[in-house]
Image (cartoon, rainbow, N blue to C red):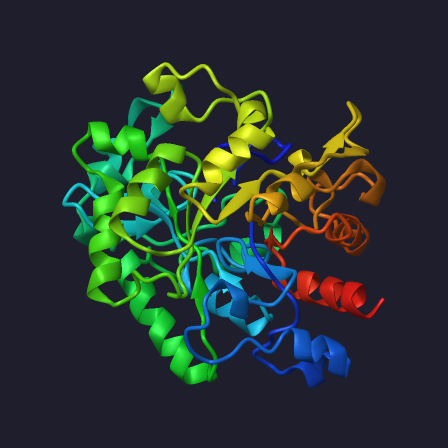
Amino acid sequence: MGTQENEQTGTTGRRALLGAAVLGAGGAVLGLSGTARAAGSASYGNGGLKSLPKPTIIGHRGASGYRPEHTFGSYNLALDLGADIVEAGDLVPTKDGHLVCRHEPEIGGTTNVADHPEFAGRKTTKVLDGVSTTGWFTEDFTLAELKTLRAIERIPANRPHNTLYNGRWEIPTFEEVLKWQDEQTRRRGKQVWIYPETKHPTYFRKLGLGLEERVAKLLHKYGKDKRNSPVILQSFEPSSIQRLNTLVDNPLVVLLSAAGTRPWDFVEAGDPRTVADLITPKGLREIAGYAQGLGPTLDLVITRKADGSLDQETTLVSDAHKVGLILHPYTMRNENPFLPLEYRKGTAVDAYGDPFGAFKRYFATGIDGVFTDNADTGVLARQDFVNG
């Protein structure tokens, strides 16, 4: 997902979807009941959003709790662990106009670019959505140059075991992801869904590297630009979703950060509205005019107290459902720092808390799915919820 996600540890992150019990290994392996298996039996083919199980388990950047994010190692593992959808692609462009999958255009924290002396001179400082950021940026590299790099773990303090896989996988392109999707669909005998995001679209449009047209061109090329295509598109900038709505017929989702924040395209356009305005009945009706869903931060579903514990359940789920929008909030993670206070165990930043308890609490609000770094945890939590 995206830069506007509050990950509580000071790092940036991002988003969410529908789910039940679709499993590459088969429901029997996890001991699901007949009820749960029936709920999760998404059809092989193109059934559209309605074919997805509920609540949907979305593999956030793949299985990023176990492998460096946005790699084919992470994407494949997410499917192996039972994810219904893989968030394959936070999409950013290269200098020569290709779309690649990175959490951010700045790649110093997600690749080994710092170990490449030939690229030392590319390190620079840019203002990205109003924030001064120093590092290496995808738009300063050709695709061929980026392909010489390898992915590394983004948050090693929380996930030291993931560093075992540093350097193993290269940066995927969006076109490679679309081919991978078809290959995995054939291999696994069920439709594989993906959930790419346009990252910083206003920033890139100013650089002459508009994202939406590039996304649409590839979706057209691979015949995945239809209403029932297994590709859901998302963005933190409503204008990007509105632009995509004129280019393709795919399901579209508007991502929402904290209530008091403003989407960057609103800042650029002088629109004074905040996320709080977008989640009013009026704002939701407007979004429903060009999108099919919302990807809110979990704190918009249940607010938090100052100490990080859960506070009040909001009316967002019911209000969104009234206007026909699905909700796929972000992001559930197993480690202590990312969980509400009451679900943490101890203080170690790399130790697991009680994510099952947190999943149960969020599922009970009626959300249609959730983004998670740990798809296997999400699948088991859903099993508990469906059979409970």
Name the spot of residue 299 as percent of width and height, x first: 67, 35
Name which residue lies at 58% across and 39% down: 296
Vertical arrangement, residue 170 with respect to residue 154, above or below: below
Front-lying residue, 23 or 232: 232
Front-lying residue, 358 or 320: 320
Name which residue lies at 56% across and 58% down: 58
Name the spot of residue 260 as percent of width and height, x first: 58, 20
Q: Quadrant of residue 22?
A: bottom right
Name the spot of residue 109 as percent of width and height, x first: 43, 40
Name which residue lies at 21% across and 27% down: 206
Front-lying residue, 371 or 388: 388
Name the spot of residue 155 as percent of width and height, x first: 55, 43
Left or right, 357 with reference to 201: right
Left or right, 121 with reference to 257: left
Vertical arrangement, residue 206 with respect to residue 62, above or below: above
Residue 146 appears in the picture as rendered: no
Left or right, 321 with reference to 166: right
Vertical arrangement, residue 100 with respect to residue 287, above or below: below
Q: Quadrant of residue 141?
A: top left
Residue 288 appears in the picture as rendered: yes
Name which residue lies at 81% across and 70% down: 387
Tally of numbered discs? 0
Front-lying residue, 4 or 63: 4
Location of the C terminus (image quadrant): bottom right
Q: Quadrant of residue 113?
A: top left
